[in-house]
Image (cartoon, rainbow, N blue to C red):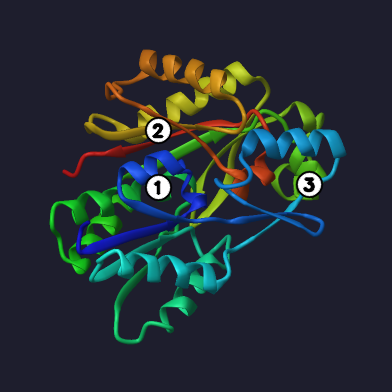
């Protein structure tokens, strides 16, 4: 294996298969239905999450991994031969995951462990982890691997459209995100990442208009720059994700291979089933 191990959490929207193929270790965000605890990507995915939510009418809670889960991942990496670790965490603005990863680092005082607050969510965070893994496989030092991840952040653009405000209403967050809008459950909010948080950008009335606006915003963000990576993320809506990919290909230059991935339960519990979005990483200028 590479002398630098790359670790991230499951809020990165990297599937276990993609992570394994790239040599990335995943630390799971946990989902709590009362006293029942499920590990994202191990025991629960978006489809299973919302099947239960729709059946029971109750949203679960989420929690950051305990420091011990990061410590276990660190130890496994070192046991496998890594000399150092770069850990890319979901934005500290939305989760205690970064703090947990830092706390776990204190258990390895003689080891080099670099913990990054991505200030990103979902596959935008995932792009940072993928860039780190690419650098690690190329033989980069831990410092260079960290720099490769951070260099991706400013070139990544993410936009998404919610299918419904039903789940935000269930969680009590609807007042914050769409206060004063008549017919709330028919509004399709457009979301993006601002200051490390997923925030409301615009409100659109229909799904087709929302998808068209997301495509327009992505095309505007990319401009004439080549696209290095592109991903479509969704919440329990794989067919919709493929349809959205086809729409994007009519609106902007897309790479031959586009990753389609789940948002994952640590984030999707707040957005709801049917959400579709995309992230693009432009090539360095």
Please tell me whether mark 1 sits on a helix, a strand or a loop: helix
Distance from Cα at disc 1 to Cα at disc 2: 10 Å
Res. 203 image quadrant: top right
Q: Residue furthest front?
A: 79
Q: Contact (CB < 8 A) between labels 1 and 2?
A: yes
Report the residue at 29% width, 80% height from top: 111
Spot occupied by residue 277 in the image (x, y as percentages of width and height) = 51, 32
Relative depth, front residue between 259 and 119: 259
Q: Is residue 234 above or below residue 104?
A: above
Please tell me how crowded label 2 is: few (under 14), some (14-19), or many (20+) other residues with Cα within 10 Å.
many
Q: Is residue 238 above or below residue 8?
A: above
Please tell me whether mark 2 sits on a helix, a strand or a loop: strand
Please tell me how crowded label 1 is: few (under 14), some (14-19), or many (20+) other residues with Cα within 10 Å.
many
- Circle on res. 126: 1
Q: Is residue 166 shown to the viewer in this render? A: no
Spot occupied by residue 62 in the image (x, y as percentages of width and height) = 68, 56
Pointer 3 residue = 59
Distance from Cα at disc 3 to Cα at disc 1: 25 Å
Pointer 2 residue = 231
What quarter of the picture does the N terminus occupy? bottom left
Distance from Cα at disc 2 to Cα at disc 3: 27 Å
Q: Residue furthest bottom?
A: 109
Res. 250 image quadrant: top left
Report the residue at 16% width, 66% height from top: 141
Res. 61 image quadrant: bottom right
Please tell me how crowded label 3 is: few (under 14), some (14-19), or many (20+) other residues with Cα within 10 Å.
many
Report the residue at 23% width, 29% height from top: 224
Spot occupied by residue 194 in the image (x, y as percentages of width and height) = 49, 52
Spot occupied by residue 21 in the image (x, y as percentages of width and height) = 32, 41
């Amino acid at each position: 294996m590479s002398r630098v191990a790359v670790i991230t959490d499951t809020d990165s929207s990297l599937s276990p298969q993609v992570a394994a193929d790239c040599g990335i270790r995943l630390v799971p965000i946990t989902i709590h239905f009362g006293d029942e605890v499920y590990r994202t990507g191990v025991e629960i995915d978006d489809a299973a999450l919302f099947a239960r939510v729709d059946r029971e009418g109750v949203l679960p809670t989420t929690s950051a991994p305990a420091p011990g889960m990061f410590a276990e991942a660190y130890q496994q990496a070192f046991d496998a031969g890594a000399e150092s670790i770069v850990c890319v965490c979901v934005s500290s603005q939305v989760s205690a995951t970064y703090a947990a990863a830092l706390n776990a680092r204190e258990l390895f005082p003689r080891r080099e462990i670099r913990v990054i607050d991505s200030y990103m969510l979902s596959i935008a965070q995932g792009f940072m982890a993928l860039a780190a893994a690419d650098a690690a496989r190329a033989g980069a030092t831990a410092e260079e691997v960290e720099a490769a991840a951070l260099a991706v952040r400013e070139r990544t653009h993410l936009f998404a459209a919610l299918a419904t405000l039903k789940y935000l209403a269930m969680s009590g967050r609807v007042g914050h995100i769409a206060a004063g809008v008549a017919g709330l459950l028919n509004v399709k909010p457009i979301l993006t990442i601002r200051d490390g948080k997923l925030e409301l950008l615009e409100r659109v009335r229909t799904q087709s208009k929302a998808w068209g606006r997301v495509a327009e915003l992505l095309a505007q963000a990319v401009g004439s720059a080549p696209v290095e990576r592109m991903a479509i993320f969704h919440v329990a809506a794989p067919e919709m994700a493929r349809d959205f990919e086809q729409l994007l290909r009519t609106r902007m230059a897309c790479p031959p291979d586009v990753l389609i991935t789940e948002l994952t339960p640590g984030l999707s519990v707040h957005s709801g089933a049917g959400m579709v979005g995309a992230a693009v990483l432009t090539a360095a200028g």
